[in-house]
Image (cartoon, rainbow, N blue to C red):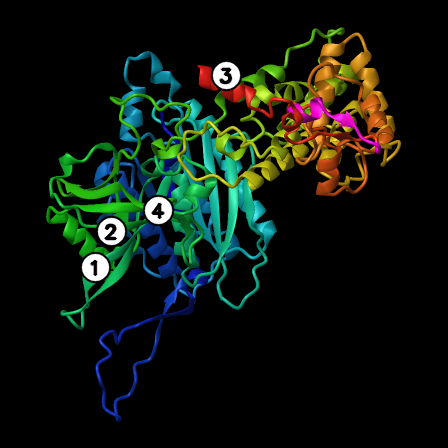
Amino acid sequence: MFPANHKTVFVLDHTPQFGSSYDSVVELDVGNKPRGVSMIPLSPIYKSLWTASVESALEYCRVVWDLFPERKYIRFVVSDIQGHVLNSWSPSQQNLAYIQNQLGMIGVPNIATRPVHAENSVVPGLQAAVDSICQCTDIQHERRTSLSENASKILNRSRVICITSQRDNQSIKHLQDSFAKFVSQANKKAANSDTLIPINHCHLVILNVTSRNNEPCLVNPVPPTDISSTVTSEVHAVLPNGNIAVKLSHLILQHYDLASTTVTNIPMKEEQNASSSANYDVEIFHLSEAHASILKGSAQDTALVKTLREGREYDTVTLKWCTPKASAAEMHHCTAMHRITPVDVNSRPSSCLINFLLNGRSVMLEMPRKNGGKVSSHMLAAHGGEIFVHTLGTSRSVLEDPPSISEGPGGRVTDYRITDFGQLMKKNKLLPLKRKRNDDSLSKDDVSNLDRMRQRLERFTKHWPITISSTSVFNLRPDLDPLLNAIVKETISEEEVVQCKQVILNLVAQESRNEPLQPSQSGQRTKGPKRDEQYRQMFAELETLIRSHCRTDQHTAVLNCLLDCRNRSDDDPKVKLERKDDKVELDQALRELDQMAASPSASVNGQRVSVIRATTDSPMSPPPMSGTSLPLSSIRGQARTNTHSIYSSGHRTVLDFLISSDSKANRPEFHGLLNSDVGPNGNKVAKLYAHLNSQDGGRGDNSMNEGE
């Protein structure tokens, strides 16, 4: 209910050491007016450590009270010989005007007076700060005196920021131990009091300031460390030249959960030349919840808008100025609203931006997109004299349908392999095993099971394309299912090896016939690669897939088949290829195919023979013989014995093909050759006009014709 930033106490070291000046000149001649030659230049005025500490603490208070007008209380304690409390927890004393008047009455420390034990003079201020924390604020007193059940459950948490200058780490350790002792004593005193409240936890922040910029710092920074059960302390070593304000600006973001936004490209007219304008940047502070919608993505996306502030120790979100078309702020869909305050309140760009917004205008802030576009993510507008940053809705509305799993960021439709991903999860499902022992220690079997499952999951995901358009092997599911289902197994049988080889040979045969691959089902109408490039990508991906699952000799045999078909040699030394003979004689291969065709499983082997024949024959090979199929070895034997066969080996000409062809089987013989006589050479000789030697001289037919 009451966090640590509910109560904050500043303890300012008012020792004579803080009255010394450092190398920070106060510019008095701001106008740079021309002076005569005889004019004596003004002597420089340097700031003291006390002035730098007070300015930084007041700027801290300004930011807090601008963003949190209520429920955030700050008190000031000035410590020299004793602790001087400048204000109380009353709301009437929680303002800059009251604090400035009290600090003016204290004045700058006098360097001439040096009290005894000056290095420990901040200790009385720490004790006064602990006593102030035990006092209740108005909200705590109201809650404590109420009759509700939670009245006794109030947690008194606070923070103390001590700005001091110590010599070494031992002095810092003394301050921490003294503060822890003061908290313990105050809790004992508050336990017996009706007006005081015990301290549940206190955060001590020590800013050790070096008196001179050229002096070495002997105090080491310490991260937040628990000093006791109720005290946590951290130490920061800073230089006086502006580093106190920088460090407090960084700490205030952590203490109050704030964030920084830099508004860029603000058009503003030049002060010297009103006709020209330039772009300026203004940094503002607000609650970090205003950036929740734009910083909840990946680190790569948030890096586009987050940058390290120059000269600071924190990141800022850069948003671009955009003048809205409509002046009504209620027309925009707003999801959150938070107060803002400028970081440099005295600069001219900040003053112009604040006056512009207080006059009833509004400013849209654009955020760059990853693809180069822009989107309006925030809006600056004033309500009732206070300026707020409005977080605009950049995502889907609750009235719209929820995004589908196939839609990417921004509603972009993607082609994720959703079904295949579900199958991947089913194949790698982990189930709890019942332990044999009652203790919680892992046995050797449990460790081996975990390692084996990690290796299995790594093997399954070593090559697993996320989208459909990025793969070609998994798009050929009906044809490659036997290989894809078998290659991922721990062990493969001989029958599965034959099936995998058959799938590879079918792909090679399909490529030799110049058949296109099946188009991908990605739904994207884009011009795909050429046919040769498709096969090249497919075989390369298939080789990568088989190599990722290559575990046994059977897996290696499938890989060897793919490499042999692609005429490639395996360069991977991890995969041992067991090859008996690189060159096998054709007669031996044909005899093996004949034996496979004659085996009982003739249907399977016959299909393999046809596949191998389709992959080994060239496009110029003669067509297979019709009718009863003969063994390949007998066909080859006939080709060797019959030299006039059209399928005989050796170089032959077109005339040889014409002579060896049998024309009788193609057409009937002439009538004259059928009735011819055999000549002396053994050849048949047919007589022309054989009927001329007959008695009627060939007129019998004519008379018949005449009779008719």
Numbered circle sitting on residue 321: 2
- The span shown in magenta is 670-681
Identify residue type, mark 1. Answer: Pro
Q: Residue furthest bottom?
A: 38
Apparent side of residue 178 relative to residue 60 in the rendered image (left or right):
right
- SS for callout 1: strand
Residue 87 in which image quadrant: top left
Decide: marks 3, 2 in contact (CB < 8 A)?
Answer: no
Q: Determine which residue is flagged by label 4.
A: 260
- Pick whichever, 377 or 212, lies toward us: 377
Whether residue 565 is visible here, answered yes or no, is yes
Q: Which residue is mark 3?
A: 704
Please name the residue shown 50% across and 56% down the image: 118
Q: Quadrant of the N terminus?
A: top left
| Residue 528 picture location, percent across and down | 47, 39
Q: Closer to us: mark 4 or mark 1?
A: 1
Pointer 4 with pointer 1, Cβ within 8 A: no
Between label 3 and label 2, give the one nearer the viewer: 3
Dot 3 crowding, Cα within 10 Å, few <14, some 14–19, many 20+: few
Closer to the camera in the image, 92 or 219: 219
Q: x and y percent of residue 368 in the render?
A: 33, 47
